[in-house]
Image (cartoon, helix red, strand yellow):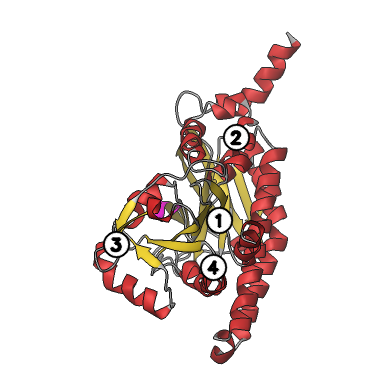
Amino acid sequence: MKKILLGLLVAAPFLAYAQNPVPYTLKGKIGKLSAPAKIYLLRGTLVMDSTTFSNGAFELKGTTDIPREAELVVQRNGRLSNAFSGSTDRKRVYLEAAPVVLTSPDSLVHATVKGGAVNQDFQRLEVSRKPLISRIQAMGAEYGKATEQQRQTPEFQERMQAKGAAIFKDYEQAHLAFIKANPASWVSLNTLLQVQQPQYAQVAPLFEALSPALKNSAPARQYGEMLQRIKLVAIGAQAPNFSQKTPDGKIVSLADYRGKYVLVDFWASWCGPCRAENPAVTKVYNEYKGRNFDILGVSLDKDNARDKWVKAIEEDHLTWTQVSDLLGWQNEAARLYQVQGIPQNFLIDPSGKIVATNLRGDALKTTLAQFIK
């Protein structure tokens, strides 16, 4: 009987969402704001709801099928042109069955959040992110203070790239640590879903450790199916072959590189982080070319951006082979390799086995040094 009761207690947060959507309430008081000031509720780029303030008070109500992360945005002029512009007065919360209350004497961004178990978990995750956000802001300040001439120097670019890579790694580790410590939390599942370029060996154990009730949810079942696809291109797996065209129409296959180390590098002309990474990749290529190593670039540009792709190749001095089917995110090779974000790459050994993935900055050179003596 004790085990049954314990199981019900663990599953309780999930039972509320098991049948039908449940109501949520977001309310609070932000200073003494009044019309025309409005508060908007966003999920991604979708505006879900909005309301005006009355002496700082607001209330938003709706229904949700599962606890979902959302963002509140205050617009003092009442107008929100799009989800990514306008006010910086924002706060992320979870829509859940328990009421969520936000209060602040001046602004939404500084509001305290009180809610149910899901929002309590989310606030703990947010606390762990604060030092990393401070590092991102410091990096942005350093970039902002630099002159255009300084920004163009290899030393500055390498320093920024190294700092960015370190922050990305620490950010990811903080998220993975939270997931490991909170296997029964909706926040853990949502955070797992947001891990960019997930490594199978890293995320599969975390997924398997999630509570049974959580793993039985629709998002978790979909994620489990995706993990099986990622497993096919995980470290140790045989790299799937693909063939695409170069800018001049020549068909090139990954199989053409059998017998040497090859880095399959997914990127695009419109991808800022990719373009920022290219100088480091070029430097490594120039050092290792001719030593049984090559690179095969795969662009996620679209057909209407073919000229931009070619121009980016020239501007970034990418002298290795470049291919694409010009289908953007529907690129056949990218889908085959489960690419969910770029830049992303896969290092393949002479036998065709994947030996490393997602090598950024100095990690590429360090890894190649281990394999190519």
Amino acid under label 4?
Answer: Thr
**Residue behind mark 4:** 88
Q: Left or right of 324: which side holds 215?
A: right
Q: Is label 4 or label 2 in front? A: 2
Residue range highlighted in magenta: 43-48
Which of the marked residues, 1 or 4, is nearer the chain's N terminus? 4
Mark 1 → mark 4, Cα distance in angstroms: 32 Å
Q: Earlier in the sequence, mark 1 or mark 3?
A: 3
Residue kind at label 3, given as amino acid type? Lys
Disc 2 versus disc 1: nearer the observer: 1
**Amino acid type at image mark 1:** Asn
Query: Which percent across, then down, holds residue 284?
Result: 56, 70
**Circle 1 sits on which residue?**
358
**For numbered disc 2, what is the local secondary structure?**
helix
Q: Residues within 10 Å of mark 4 (few under 14, many from 20)?
A: few
Q: Which residue is mark 2?
A: 207
Task: Tell me which numbered mark, 4 or 3, is placed earlier along the sequence.
Answer: 4
Instruction: Mark 1 and mark 4 in contact? Answer it, CB < 8 Å.
Output: no
At label 2, the amino acid type is Phe
The prevailing secondary structure element of the residues shown in magenta is: strand
Q: CA distance from mark 4 to mark 3?
A: 32 Å
Q: Nearer the viewer, residue 59 or 173?
A: 173
* CA separation in Å, label 4 and label 2: 34 Å
